[in-house]
Image (spheres, rainbow, N blue to C red):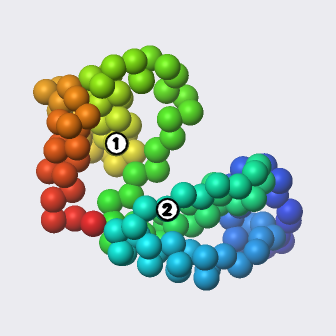
Amino acid sequence: MKRKFNVLGNCIPDKHYMVDISGKLAQIQEMVDEGLYFTITRARQYGKTTTLGLLEKRLQGEYIVARMSFEAVGSLGFETEEKFSLMFMEEMAHCLNDSTWIDPNVTSFKMLGRHLTKMCDGKK
């Protein structure tokens, strides 16, 4: 298959010319394995989305991986702890195709944290 340059959205290694980021992905996976937090910040078109997509594929067999975006949520999803908690659980359920992530009794950040801990118990 012929590869070409991609300037819009996610790059696919088999379809697009791109820098080899396998070393960077290995470093990020080490941080994930150690339970560390990290951020990926750069200007537009620097490969953030591509990096996260490849990381998702790399971690999926071993971890619960939920690829979520809050861009389309709008301000209503952030009005109260209860609305945010419900929106977050709905997004998790959608990303993981598992409705058990939704618990209508979760109405605060504290309860959401406990719920997430319970749902992830025994899993990475």
Q: Nearer the viewer, residue 92 or 38?
A: 38
Q: Is residue 57 above or below residue 119?
A: below
Q: Which mark is residue 38?
A: 2
Q: Which residue is mark 1?
A: 92
Q: Which mark is residue 32?
A: none
Q: Is residue 107 above or below residue 118?
A: above
Q: Is residue 8 above or below residue 51?
A: above
Q: Nearer the viewer, residue 111 or 92?
A: 111
Q: Residue 99 placed where, x, y %?
A: 24, 38
Q: Residue 58 placed where, x, y %?
A: 48, 72
Q: Residue 116 placed where, x, y %?
A: 22, 47
Report which quarter residue 59 is drawn in.
Answer: bottom left
Instruction: Tell whether label 1 touches label 2 (CB within 8 Å).
Output: no
Q: Residues within 10 Å of mark 1 (few under 14, many from 20)?
A: many
Q: Amino acid at mark 1?
A: Met
Report if residue 92 is visible in the image: yes
Q: Is residue 109 left or right of residue 52?
A: left
Q: Is residue 23 left or right of residue 35?
A: right
Q: Quadrant of the N terminus?
A: bottom right
